[in-house]
Image (cartoon, rainbow, N blue to C red):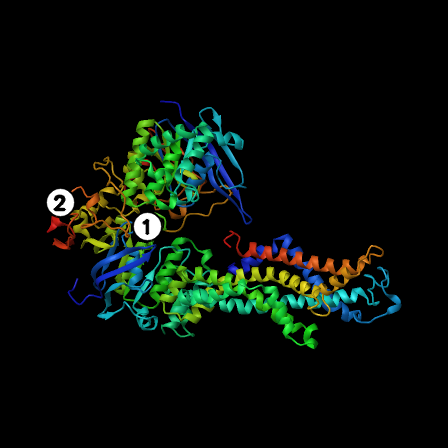
Amino acid sequence: MTRSPFQLALQRLLRNRVAIVGGSLLTLIALACVLLPVLLKLDPNLTQPALRNQPPSARFLFGTDGLGRDLVARVLVGGRTSLLVGLAATAVSVLVGVAYGAIAGFYGGKIDEAMMRLVDFMYGLPYMFLVILIMLMFSETARGDMLPVFLALGLVQWLTMARIVRGQVLALRRQEFVLAAELLGVSDARLLIRHVLPNVFGVIMVYATLMVPSVIILESFLSFLGLGVALSWGQLVSDGIAVINPIRSYWWILLWPSLFLAITLVSLNFLGDGLRDALDPKGKT
Amino acid sequence: MSHAAPLLKVTDLRVHFASEGNIIRAVDGVDLELRAGETLALVGESGCGKSTLARALVGLNPITSGAAELNGRTITGLTRAAARPFRRELQLVFQDPYASLNPRFTIAQTLAEPLLLHDKASRRNVDDKVCELLAQVGLDPELRARYPHEFSGGQRQRISIARALAVEPSLLLCDEVTSALDVSIQAQILDLLRSVQQKRGLSYLFITHDLGVVRYIAHRVAVMYVGQIVELRDTESLFEAPAHPYTKALLASIPRVSSKPRAREPLRGEVPSPAHPPSGCRFHPRCSFAFERCPKEYPDLYPVSGGSSRCFLNQ
Amino acid sequence: MSEELLRIRELSVTFATRERTVRAVEQVSFDVRPGEIVGLVGESGCGKSVTSLSILGLHEQPAGSVTGSIRLGERELVGASTKALREVRGNRVSMIFQDPLTSLNPYLRVEEQLAEVLDLHLALRGPAARARMLEILAQVGIPGEERLRAYPHQLSGGMRQRICIAMALLCNPELLIADEPTTMLDVTIQAQILELLRSLRQQRKMSILFITHDLGVVSEICDRVIVMYAGRIVEQARTADLLLAPLHPYTEALLRSTPRVDVPGGGSLHPIAGLPPRLSAKKLEECAFLPRCPRAREGCNDGEPALDNAGDERLRRCIVPVAEMGTRS
């Protein structure tokens, strides 16, 4: 039975227990965040002042926060945001980065130099500063929204992807099967899209998977600064830290979002590592 | 061999690269001609420029000066767009069977691409044509849905050859195509190339370092040394009576299956780097026949029986 | 007949991959005597490299199993501890490989790499070590001090291989294992290296196990030859005997598929049809070469032939009568 390189990679991935664990946890968390609030009719914003700061109980599995809001609802709905931000921002950076890096790597020479100088320049800028600036540029009302955050984070992350893709494309461009296709008269566009990029795809997937956690963390950091999305794990962690005091710890307000965040990040890393091993068993990247 | 106009004519071709302050004279003034249906072997050791020459002919390396013509039309110094019409007539097969096929294409896709691109087949009959091609190179057409990693080195070379033949070229450049293969598989590929040549009247520019292969497959031989041709002759003339001292040393160095112990001493010294070629005759530092003229003057190619040789002793 | 230096008996090396178990080397037995150059010949996948790597325990880990015996003088090497093997490596038995560029550490100068060996095995440092280095380099044809300070990438292929040989010789090994040492070198440089190895054997009475696929090289340098196919020995003989009158169809076919430099037209080439077999761990029910053998007949599929004596220093694994070999098949 003939198996394409993609199918072989998938097989290898499925044999990697750690990656499977990571993938499964991730799926569970994602499903929980998307479905449970709907199925259980949870409202993250319902304030119940009489029930504030309740530790975990049968009724409120994760307890309540300072405004009496159900933490299960907040963590799950907040999870939607964090995951979405992670995926969307990564998607933006992948699209921009791949396009940019592929063109630079494919043409090489002066075009590559010019394009990469720009990347170097942008790398040199203090990016958190930039992100904050971008966030501040949006009006007050838009500030809790997701779009500005997507853009801000995505536009900073693309640089890494561009560099990676450029390196891969540069190397592949000189591979003999690409030269052979070129010698057959295949057009540049087809060379890039049909011959080069499919062979870079694996590396892109790996780095994309590993980029998601860093985006989620960045978003959390923005939340600490008060610039993040209104309801996300980062925001919840920030809230949790704010109420810690020596008298009453309110540990549950900090614990649950942190736990979810940590498990998601670790799972993504496991998955990313697994992908890397599956796509490149000889360790060439 | 008829005396019709040559298929390929290379005139004073030079390919120089700049590197770390040096000029590497990879190809430094090569003239040659190749006729239809002929196999010309390009032989030499590292740094002699044979691969660079082949790649320059197909436009993978830029040319510094000189020209090459295919059927009277210039093929060097062209833009990518201008070179496109020649893609049909001139093809190159690479050495490394493991790098020359796209790992994500099935064999059918690899072979269909040139067929469709150059209108050798339509979408309706391309599959039939792919089967034909595979049969021509001795592979089972049933294998066309497979991926390169499922094939051995020898089989992959057959596929690469099939791909090159798909556009029906008149000239095939074979760049060390059997060097990475086992001896028994090499023999299969050489036979395949010979039979394809007989059936289609193809010409080959066959680059190799293996003189045994040369004697088997080539009609004529060009021996290269540090970017230049030092001897250009009919195959049998070269092997029976090599004219240039380098050719003599090369032939003497080849280990051969024989009951007699080696009589001659191996050639001394290192192969010079094309960045610093010796003065005058480039072979003089290692030549056991060198005399006062050799480091000072540069020898031309002088006629000898069956070809020419770049040595003052042949003048 | 002198005592053997290296005695290999029934060596089998198995690798377990996820899909299947591969028997890379199957019951291989042979000797190497002091001062002898023995060739191990075959094409890719025949097991010659794995055999040579097993001698020093350098085969891929985790491997499958290595069974059998490899005796160096008194010492048993199969199953020996890493510590014991390290004492032997570079010291009594040295090895040089095919690609001199990857055999040398690109980040260290030549003198540093030589110094490491001298320190480890002979506890030589400082001026004494330097003297020995210069001595060795002169012996391999690199006179003078300048090369000591060089990095590998600054040297030519032939030069690098000489340095690898020098490194291998530092401790006066009794056996040098050379795995395709000239395959990547130019023909004229190859001739130089072969001459060097021959003269070293002469001067030091050192044995060489020379692995190659090139029968011409075998003819030039080996006293005896062992031909391997599909992990087993199929023929063994003195070089002249083997090349003049091969007694196994594979050896014969190999000779006939090699283009000849000294025959008009390159001789007639007879390719061997088909591909080398995929090795498995299953016991063979027939001769490994049967699918490709031009002399196949009744009885070839009746179990694998045994390795039989066929005369003075000759072994063959074939049922075709000796008298028939040498005639047209």
Number of numbered discs? 2
Who's the residue at 40% across and 25% down the image? C4
Q: Which numbered dot is residue B292? A: 2
Asked whether residue A194 appears in the rendered view, the answer is no
**Are marks 2 and 1 in one subunit?**
no
Please name whichever residue, A181 or B189, is drawn nearer the observer in this view of the structure: A181
- Other residues around mark 2 within 10 Å, as few (<14) / some (14–19) / many (≥20): few
Residue C248 at x, y percent in the picture: 35, 39
Q: Is residue B248 left or right of residue B172?
A: left
Seen in the picture, residue C209 relative to A97 is either above or below; the reply is above
Considering the numbered disc 1 on the image, is that residue within a helix, a strand or a loop? loop
Q: Amino acid at mark 2?
A: Glu
Judged by depth in the image, the label closer to the viewer, 2 or 1, is 2
Q: Chain of mark 2?
A: B
Task: Using the image, tell me which numbered label, if any, was put on residue B84.
Answer: none
For residue B187, above or below residue C203: below
Does residue A209 appear in the picture of this structure?
Answer: yes
Picture residue at 15% right of the left edge, 65% below the top = B3
Residue B307 position within the rendered picture, expressed as x and y whole percent measured from the top left: 15, 55
In the picture of the structure, the residue carrying the numbered disc 1 is C271
Foreground: A221 or B7? A221
Q: Quadrant of residue A13?
A: bottom right
